[in-house]
Amino acid sequence: MRRRRWRTTGNALVRVALVWAVSTLTMLALAGILPDFRLQSDDGDSITQIGLTAAWGAGAFGLLSALVWPVVVRALLLVPALVLGLLVFFLNGSLLLIALRLIPDGRGEAAPETAVVVAAVMSAVASATSTALAVRDDEAYRRRLYRLAYRRRRRQGRGAAPRVGVAVPGLLVLQLDGVGYEVLREACNSALMPTVAGWLERGHRVAPWRTDWSSQTGASQLGILHGSTFDVPAFRWYEKDTREVMVCNRPTSAAELQRRAIERTGDGGLLTLDGASRGNLFSGGADQLALVLSVSARRGRANRSRSGYFAYFSDPANAVRTALSFVADAGREIVQSLRARIRGDRPRVSRGGLYPLIRAFATVVERDVVVAAVIGDMLAGRSVVYADLVAYDEVAHHSGPRGRDTDQVLERLDRSLALLARVAEHAPRPYRIVLLSDHGQSPGETFLARYGLTLKDLVRAGCGLPVSRRAGRTRSGAEARAAVLAALHRPEEEGEEAGPGPGSDPVVLASGNLALISFPDVPGRASRAGIERTHPALLATLANHPGVGFLLVDGVVLGPGGAEARLDVPGEAEELLAPFGPGAAAAVRRTDAFPHVADIMVNSAYDPDTGAVHAFEEQIGSHGGLGGEQGHPFLMWPAELSAPGEELVGAEAVHGVLRRWLREADGPQVPVAPPGDTWAGEPAPRDPGRYAAAPPARAADAVGGGTAAEVPQDSPPEGHIGGILPSDGSPARDETR
C-alpha cells in the first residue's frame, strides 16, 4: 500500500514537472516569436538566466490559473455566458501579466494584447500535455475520473452513503435534434457515423416513430419529457384569450407549456427521480439543469439554466479550445455559403448577418457545454439524463437536410457520442444509451422564393388588405437563436412575435411548412361561414394556391379545386389527405380538438415523389407540418431493453416507452426476443442468436456501484479520449471542474 502511494505521488510529480517543462518551452518560443514579449533584462541575460525566467513565469501562471481562475469565474456568475466567453481571453491575459510581474528583477514584460495571445497558447498547450500524459497513465486516468465523481457527490450531499448490491443501470437519452430516420440510415451506411453504426452491429435496435401534425421540437420534446402534447398546435400560435403569441423557443412560453403539461398529467416529468436535463426546451422535472430554456428567463444566481456555461468556462483551457473551434466553424460557414453561391445551388436562403455566429454557437459552444455536463452527470452516477444536441437541425435549416455541410455536422456529432460512450465505461454505474430524434427535416424551396410573396402577403390579398410592394422575409425560428438570446440575458424575442399590433388585421404565424391564421377581433374560434362572410375570397385564394396543400377550417379540410372533407365523417379526410402519408387525417383530427387551434391552419403543398415542401419561413430544410421525412424521427435502444412494440405514434407514446425502460432498470430484465431486423424492413446481416441475451456484465457492473472514490477494475479505453469535449482537432483535458 505504501509503495503504491509513493508511486502515485511520484507519477503525479513527474506529470507536473513535464507540464511545467512544456509550458516553459512554449513561453521561450513565444518570447522569440512575438516582438512585444520579452523574458530578459534590458542589459541582456544568458541563455540559462532566460530559461530560469521562463520557468518562473510558467510556474507562476500555472499556479494563478489553478487558484485564482475558478474564483474569478464564480464572481462573474451574473455575466452573460457569451460575454464570459469573450472575457476569458482578457482575464487569462491579465493572469499572465500578474505572473510576469512576479518574476524577480522585472525580467518579464509583455504588451497587454500580446499577453492575451501568450496566455491562450500556453493554456492550450498545457491542457494538451496534461491530457496526453493522463491518457498514457491508466491509473491516473481512472483516479481523476472517480475523484471528479466523488467531488460532485460530496457537493450534492450524496457521497456519504455507498450503494450496496448490484449497480442499477442508468439511462442516458441523447436527442439528435432534427435527424430523421432515413438520414440516420444513410449516415450509418455511408460510414458518416461509425459509432452509431457500431452500436447497431453490437446489439442496438432502431425504428421510426411518427410525430403529430406539429412536427417540431416544442411539441415533441414536451411530449417526450412531460407526457403531453395537448394544445400545442404549432411552433408558434396566437391565443385569443390572453392576446399573446406563444412561441415554443421563448422562455416564458416554454415555462407556461411545461406548467400546463404538468397540470394535465399530474406528474413532474420523466426526469423527476435523480435526473438531469441538458440543453433542452423543458426541464422534464429534473433537479439538475443546464441550458434549459423553460427556466432561462429567471434572473440571478438561482438560474441554473446557464450554470453549464460557467462550470465549463471555469477551466480556461476549455474556453480557449471552444473559442478557437467557434471561430473556425463560423469561418467554415462563411466559406460554405460562398461556395453555394458560386455553384448556384438551388434552393438557397440567405446565410449572412449574424447567422455564422448563431450556427457556430449551436455546433460548437452548445455542443461542448452539453457534452461536458452529460459527462459530469455520468460520473456522478445520475439515474437518468436527457440531453439535446441541436447542431444538425440548425445547419439543415439553412443548408438542407442532405449535403456536405450536414455530413460534416453528423461526423462531429458521432465523435461526441463516441466520447460519451467511452466515459460511460468509467461511470460508477452502467449506462444504457438511448438515441432518438424529435422530428426529421423535409427539403424544398421556400414559399417566398418559389412564388415571390409570403403567406402573409397572400392572406392580406385574399382579405382585400393592402400588400407591401416589397416582399418581407419571415425569420427562421430555429432553436439555436433562442439559446443565443438566453445566453445573452435577452431571452425574449421582440417585434411581431411579441404580440399582434392594434387593429383587426389577421395574425399570420409560420411554423416551418405549417402556418396559422387568426382573426384577433373574432372571439373564440372563427366559423367557416363567418370567415366567408367577412372575407369571401380568402379561403378559395388559399386553397387553390399551388403552394398550399390543404386548409383546416372549423372542422373541415379544404383542398385544391374545391375539394373538402369533414373530419366528423369517417373516411373523407383519410382520402383527401392520403398523399401526406398514413395517419395524416388522425393528426389533423386531433389538432382540430385543441382549444387554441387557429382559425385557419395552412399546410404547404407536398410532392410525394421528391419529398419537397415549401416552408413559410426562410428555411430550405424545414419541419413543423405534414409531408415527407419531417414527420419520421427515430428511436434507437440497446437490445437488453424491451422492444417499443407497435408503431409509435406521437411523442406521448415515446414518453411511455421511456417510462417503461426506467422501470425495467429496477426490476427483472425483460427477455430479449429474437432480434430480427436491426433496421425496420431490412434483414440484419448478423447471427440472430448472438443477441438473445444481455451483453456480458462489465467489471463496472460487478463493482456493485460502490462509492465514487473507489477505483474500478476495468481498464480505460485504448487511444485518445479527448477529455470533455470533441472540439475539432484539439486535445482536451480529461477533467471537468
Image (cartoon, grey):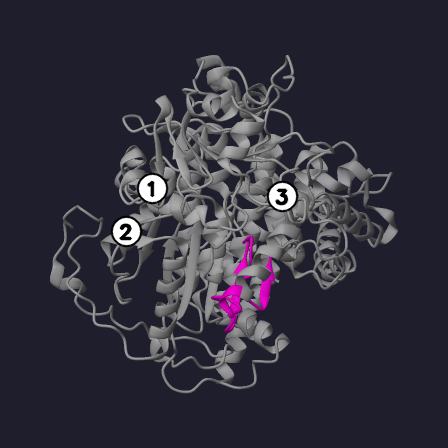
Mark 3 falls on what kind of element? Answer: loop
Q: Looking at the image, can residue 736 be seen?
A: no
Disc 3 crowd, CA 10 A, few/some/many (<14, 14-19, 20+): few
Say whether residue 259 is visible.
yes
Answer with left or right where residue 6 lies relative to residue 686: right
SS of the residue under disc 2: strand
Foreground residue among 321 and 608 = 608
Q: Which residue is mark 1?
A: 584
Q: Secondary structure at mark 1?
A: helix
Q: Is residue 629 magenta?
A: no
Magenta segment boundaries in residue numbering: 264-292
Look at label 3 and name its amino acid. Answer: Pro
Question: Considering only vertical position in the picture, is 282 above or below 463?
Answer: below
Quarter of the view holding residue 115: top right
Pick whichever, 40 or 421, lies toward us. 421
State whether residue 152 is above or below residue 721. Answer: below
**Residue 721 x, y percent position in the rendering:** 44, 55
Asked if the residue under mark 3 is in contact with the one under mark 2, i.e. CB atoms within 8 Å, the reply is no
Of pointers 2 and 3, the one earlier in the residue sequence: 2
**Can you give x and y, in whole percent of width and height, for residue 669 in the image?**
27, 75
Residue type at mark 1: give it: Ala
Give the dominant element type of the magenta stretch: helix, strand or loop: loop
The residue closer to the viewer here, 230 or 644, is: 230
Residue 208 percent coordinates (x, y)? 30, 48
- Residue 149 percent across, percent down from the top left: 53, 71
Disc number for residue 461? none
Looking at the picture, does residue 684 appear above or below residue 148? above
Residue placed under numbered mark 3 in the picture: 523
Amino acid type at circle 2 is Ala
Q: CA distance from mark 2 to mark 3?
A: 43 Å
